[in-house]
Amino acid sequence: MATLTFALFCALAVLLIHWYGGFEPERLGAYDLAVLGLGCLRLIHLITYDKLLEPLRERLEGGRGLTGLLSDFVSCIWCTGMWSALITTTLYFLGPWGRLSVIVLAVAGLGALLQVISRAVAGCTIEPQK
């Protein structure tokens, strides 16, 4: 059921981009891939880990049917990753406003990534106090 749903949304995304956006594969560069990757990273983290959506995850937990499917979606980073990739890619190719929303996610993702790196470096270089 989940695979069929995803396939239908992929088809819908292709149609939306065809009708309202633009996709030119030959113009897709490293910058676009970096923005899409960082935007997807941030969206995955937002859905699966951040406090902002914690009440939603708790409400869906243990559900059956559609609720169970949504519960799996918000608790599995691999499932969330596929959907997040579809969402960010579709938004990115729908036009300037969609691209802006993905860039905002990418900047937030880069900031989060730099924060994790700086904490790891600080933890390795600062000697514990005795």
Image (cartoon, rainbow, N blue to C red):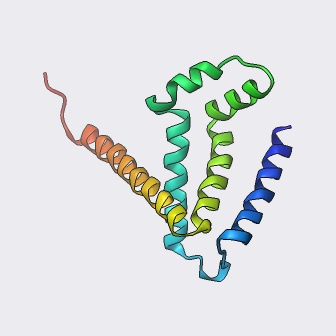
Q: Is residue 14 shown above or below 123?
A: below
**116 with respect to 45 (left or right):** left
Residue 126 lies, with reference to residue 51, above or below; the image says: below
Labels in figure, total: 0
Q: Residue at x 77, y 51 (%)?
A: 9
Give the residue at the far left of this rendering.
Answer: 130
The residue lying at 75 percent from left, 64 percent from top is: 14
Instruction: Name the quarter where the C terminus is drawn.
Output: top left
Q: Kindly identify the residue that appears in the image at 61 percent across and 66 percent down.
A: 94
Q: Is residue 116 left or right of residue 75?
A: left
Instruction: Give the residue at the far bottom of this rendering.
Output: 26
The image shows residue 41 at horizontal and vertical percentages of: 52, 49
Residue at x 63%, y 53% (from the top left corner): 87
Q: Is residue 39 left or right of residue 26?
A: left
What percent of the width, then of the height, locates residue 53?
51, 30
> Residue 39 at what x, y percent from top left?
50, 55
